Image (cartoon, rainbow, N blue to C red):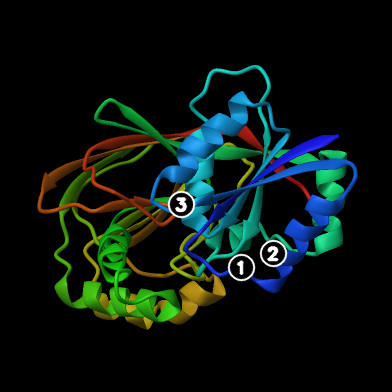
């Protein structure tokens, strides 16, 4: 018997495919399935912690990147000898990690992977800041992307979906002021104005933009994309390349590889985010946990 907990973002309407997988899991004689519906932000973190203590074999994040991130942060910090498999069932707006990992979903394949406990280890990003630790699977960023998420969260009270994301980006374009940051990696140091620093385990963010074409989720390396003192016009002119996953050729755009990065605010307001979750932090040290979690492989 395989014990499976589905932690479901209750604010999202379930797709037909998700409903089918939930129904098949509930009816399967070799699966003990429990559905947990979350209603408020951060609730999935606590529910995931409980599922770890209750020794579930597989914990499934049903939602978008934010739900995935909360479940991850519920699993990762605990001291345990048995670590559950993390599975992701996309039911959100962007689901960018699914794109980064190139996941293809078929109900039968998903179910068979659960029954076989088929999994593969992947890397996890680790953020240390203000005495706290946060984890991410896909991308964390400081600057423009963080501001987009900050605005997006405020809009969600009256506007949802992909339209809300597009409007948040436009609002950020017109109001963003580049902060001055200090960046230190294993082999690189920089101090100056920054549009954005993207710290990538996966390569896709912002609803399908490939911010780093070199990122891999299992190579033990953080891939960094930093956009320095570039203009918003530069950013807009390169959107086609970002959508196609082509490297941007610009004197203020750089791609780096590192195992850790330290970011400090020198001047200006700083916004941060990880996997689409807003972080009200400024100074941070980010590192990679190689093979930090097992993910369902189908």
Circles 1 and 2: CB distance less than 8 Å? yes
Mark 1: give few (<14), some (14-19) or many (20+) Cα within 10 Å.
some
Measured as percent of width and height from the top left, residue 93 is found at 50, 70
Q: How many marks?
A: 3
- Of labels 3 and 2, earlier in sequence is 2
On the rendered structure, is 280 left or right of 159? left
Circles 1 and 3: CB distance less than 8 Å? no
- Tell me the residue that label 2 is attached to: 18
Residue occupying the far left of the picture: 267
Tell me the number on the disc at residue 139: 3
Label 3 – label 2 distance at C-alpha: 25 Å
The structure residue drawn at horizontal position 19% and vertical position 47%, both measured from the top left corner, is: 181
Label 1 – label 3 distance at C-alpha: 25 Å
On the rendered structure, is 288 left or right of 154? right
On the rendered structure, is 126 left or right of 177? right
Label 1 – label 2 distance at C-alpha: 6 Å
Q: Nearer the viewer, residue 13 or 92?
A: 13
Q: Nearer the viewer, mark 1 or mark 3?
A: 1
Residue 176 visible: yes
Circles 3 and 2: CB distance less than 8 Å? no
Measured as percent of width and height from the top left, residue 274 is found at 40, 50
The structure residue drawn at horizontal position 80% and vertical position 64%, both measured from the top left corner, is: 106
Q: Nearer the viewer, residue 22 or 182?
A: 22
The structure residue drawn at horizontal position 29% and vertical position 69%, both measured from the top left corner, is: 157
- The vertical placement of 233 against 81, above or below, is below
Q: Nearer the viewer, residue 45 or 122?
A: 45
- Tell me the residue that label 1 is attached to: 14
Mark 3: give few (<14), some (14-19) or many (20+) Cα within 10 Å.
many
Measured as percent of width and height from the top left, residue 68 is found at 54, 50
- Of labels 1 and 3, earlier in sequence is 1
């Amino acid at each position: 018997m395989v014990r499976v907990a589905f932690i479901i973002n209750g604010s999202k309407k379930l797709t037909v495919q998700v409903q089918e997988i939930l129904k098949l899991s509930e009816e399967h004689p070799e699966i003990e399935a429990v559905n947990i519906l979350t209603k408020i932000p951060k609730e999935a973190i606590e529910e995931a912690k409980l599922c770890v203590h209750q020794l579930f074999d597989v914990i499934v994040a049903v939602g978008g990147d934010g739900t995935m991130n909360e479940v991850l942060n519920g699993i990762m910090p605990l001291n345990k000898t048995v670590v559950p498999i993390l599975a992701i069932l996309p039911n959100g707006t962007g689901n960018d990690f699914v794109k980064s990992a190139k996941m293809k979903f078929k109900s039968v394949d998903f179910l068979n992977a659960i029954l076989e406990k088929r999994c593969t280890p992947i890397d996890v990003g680790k953020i240390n800041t203000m005495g706290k630790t946060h984890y991410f699977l896909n991308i964390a960023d400081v600057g423009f992307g963080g501001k987009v998420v900050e605005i997006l969260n405020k809009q969600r009270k009256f506007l949802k979906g992909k339209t809300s994301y597009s409007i948040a980006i436009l609002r950020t374009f017109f109001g963003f002021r580049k902060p001055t940051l200090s960046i230190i990696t294993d082999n690189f140091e920089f101090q100056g104005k920054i549009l954005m620093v993207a710290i990538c385990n996966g390569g896709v963010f912002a609803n399908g933009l490939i911010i780093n074409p070199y990122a891999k989720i299992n190579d033990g390396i953080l891939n960094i994309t930093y956009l320095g003192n570039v203009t918003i016009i530069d950013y807009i002119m390169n959107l086609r390349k970002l959508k196609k996953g082509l490297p941007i050729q610009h004197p203020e755009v750089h791609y780096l590889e590192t195992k850790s990065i330290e970011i400090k605010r020198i001047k200006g307001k700083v916004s941060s985010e990880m996997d689409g979750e807003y972080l009200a932090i400024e100074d941070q040290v980010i590192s990679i946990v190689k093979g930090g979690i097992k993910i369902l492989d189908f």
